[in-house]
Image (cartoon, rainbow, N blue to C red):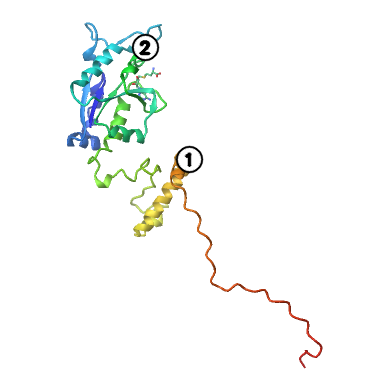
Amino acid sequence: MRVDIVTLFPELFEGFFRTSIVGRAHEGGQLQVRFRSPRDFGTGKHRSVDDTPCGGGSGMVLRVDVMVACLESLEDVQPRAHRVLLTPQGARFDQKKARELAARPAIALICGRYEGFDERIREFVDEEISLGDFVMTGGEIAAMAIVEATSRLLPGVLGNAESATEESHGDEGLLEYPHYTRPIEFRGKTVPAELLSGNHAAIARYRHAQAEARTEARRPDLYAAYREAHPPPPPKPPKRSKRRPTVDAAPAAPPKPGDEES
Ligand SMILES: C[S@@+](CC[C@H](N)C(=O)[O-])C[C@H]1O[C@@H](n2cnc3c(N)ncnc32)[C@H](O)[C@@H]1O
């Protein structure tokens, strides 16, 4: 997968693309990264990328002509990247979106700064993504989050030991079960006995039940969707008893005269 990053501050990514799983994906060639700076397409002697807002107001706005020239320059390589504008006004990023982006051959992550972009850039992008309902100074951290969540889904990036199949927000839509490691006892708090049993089937059942319970407790929205897709099995009919049904004994007939024991 190719990731084109449009940013005025490529130096923020130093280290990021050299470290851990993203670093491995980069080194292994599953992730190809290119940086492009709007500054290279800026106007005038100072290569300006921004200007004052029409109608007045504080801050500076990234120019549409500069940004679009920068985006179009990325088409020197095919396939054309799916253009993602990073903005707090976009659709909130989640694991489903990470899977969707990971399936694309190329994406361009467009990082804003200052007051953001001239509105007209929206007509030159394919979608708008937000990292969450808060405002950062620039789009670079959002770009890193998207690269990190997406690259670990690329085939061959995670080893078996790091498999993404059982993680939170996976195919089943549950949060992951709780993890424990040594020491078995810490300040009176112990590892659940079920995990120490050595019975793999029982451990799998316990973990799945834990994943369900914690999703229900923490994320009722996810749990409702999970339950709709996985209705619980109908309750088993009560077992029929093998014992003969007892017949109520008829009331004893009153003793006849002469029946008395002598
Ligand atoms: C200070 S913000 C601009 C915010 C804009 N004036 C607004 O109120 O919607 C500058 C840039 O940071 C990035 N940014 C800030 N918060 C973000 C978020 N939650 N998700 C994605 N990008 C964000 C965007 O690229 C944005 O253009």
Give the residue at x 78% y 82%: 254
Is disc 2 placed on a helix, strand or loop? Answer: loop
Above or below 241: residue 184 = above
* Residue 70 screen position, x and y as percent: 24, 17
- The one nearer the camera, 182 or 40, is 40
Q: Is 25 on the left-hand or right-hand side of 94?
A: left
Instruction: Count neighbours of disc 1 (C-alpha within 10 A) and say few if under 14, some if 14 to 19, many if 20 or more.
Output: few
Residue indicated by mark 2: 59
Residue indicated by mark 1: 220
Is disc 1 placed on a helix, strand or loop? Answer: helix
Number of marks present in the image shown: 2
Q: Quadrant of residue 27?
A: top left
- The one nearer the camera, 180 or 198, is 198
Residue 113 visible (yes or no): no
Give the amino acid at mark 2: Gly
Give the residue at x 34% y 33%: 97
**CB atoms at circles 2 and 1 under 8 Å apart?**
no
Q: Quadrant of residue 59?
A: top left
Give the residue at x 23% y 8%: 46
* Residue 87 screen position, x and y as percent: 36, 22
